[in-house]
Image (cartoon, rainbow, N blue to C red):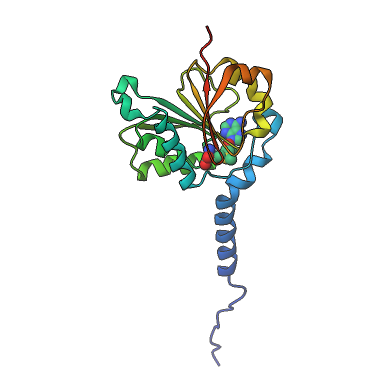
Amino acid sequence: MKSTAVPDPGVSPVPFYCLAAITATATIALSPFLLTPMLPRRIFGALPYQHTPRDKLNSAFKLLSKHGLSPESSSSHSKRLKFVDLGSGAGEAVLMASRKGFDALGVEINPTLLAISHASRLFTQTSPGVARFSSSNLLTLPYSSFDVIFLFGVKPLLSQLEPKLISEVKPSGHLLLYRFTLPSTPDYKKKYEIVDRDGELTLYRRVNET
Ligand SMILES: C[S@@+](CC[C@H](N)C(=O)[O-])C[C@H]1O[C@@H](n2cnc3c(N)ncnc32)[C@H](O)[C@@H]1O
């Protein structure tokens, strides 16, 4: 009698593939939150990722505009105001700045967040300004060319940033801080004045020395 070969179902690999796919997706999705805090803070000054909510960004650009920091007032390319987000996360502030007409740069240490920023730029309007993203350490970037420096969540880095904020920001350059303020040290008091506040946003101007 001929025996009919019954395929042995064994263990189906499908659940394993599903599990692997779910794990890979979760790892990629969570890496902005997992990877940055794991970077050695003493070397990279790494901070966890949290983004500025859109309504706060809208308020931030209204505050800038209220104080004449609106690129509409300097529409020619050569006079386009320069904006930098130090630790630009997923790039929302930079993309909004470029839509407002700034020459905007985001510096970010986390490669996943940088990839998200580059991808968002492809699918978002950036004109009339320019949006660029750089894989850089905010502790080593030169600050002297920027008109507006935006910072969120760098409080743990302030002592490392202090020499740069004191000596590199150009006279009349502005700092826009979200969720924290500058410490009231004599050096900061001598170099910065508060221009305005809106909730957790504080706008500072680097004073002109005579
Ligand atoms: C609180 S998040 C702010 C994100 C974004 N600026 C926003 O407001 O939506 C801080 C960001 O700084 C980045 N970061 C931390 N240390 C950094 C460093 N040394 N150089 C560049 N980026 C850094 C983190 O990866 C994180 O994305």
Q: Nearer the viewer, residue 93 or 29?
A: 93
- Residue 183 lies, with reference to residue 145, above or below; the image says below
Q: Residue at x 28, y 23 (%)?
A: 76
* Camera sees residue 89: no
Q: Residue at x 36, y 42 (%)?
A: 122
- Residue 182 lies, with reference to residue 59, above or below; the image says above
Q: Residue at x 61, y 75 (%)?
A: 10
Residue at the extreme left of the image, as rendered: 76
Which corner quadrant of the figure contains ligand 1? top right
Q: Residue 181 location, x and y as percent?
A: 61, 32
Q: Quadrant of residue 190?
A: top right
Q: Nearer the viewer, residue 123 or 130?
A: 130
Left or right of 55: which side holds 193?
right
Residue at the extreme bottom of the image, as rendered: 1
Q: Residue 194 location, x and y as percent?
A: 55, 27
Q: Residue 26 location, x and y as percent?
A: 58, 56
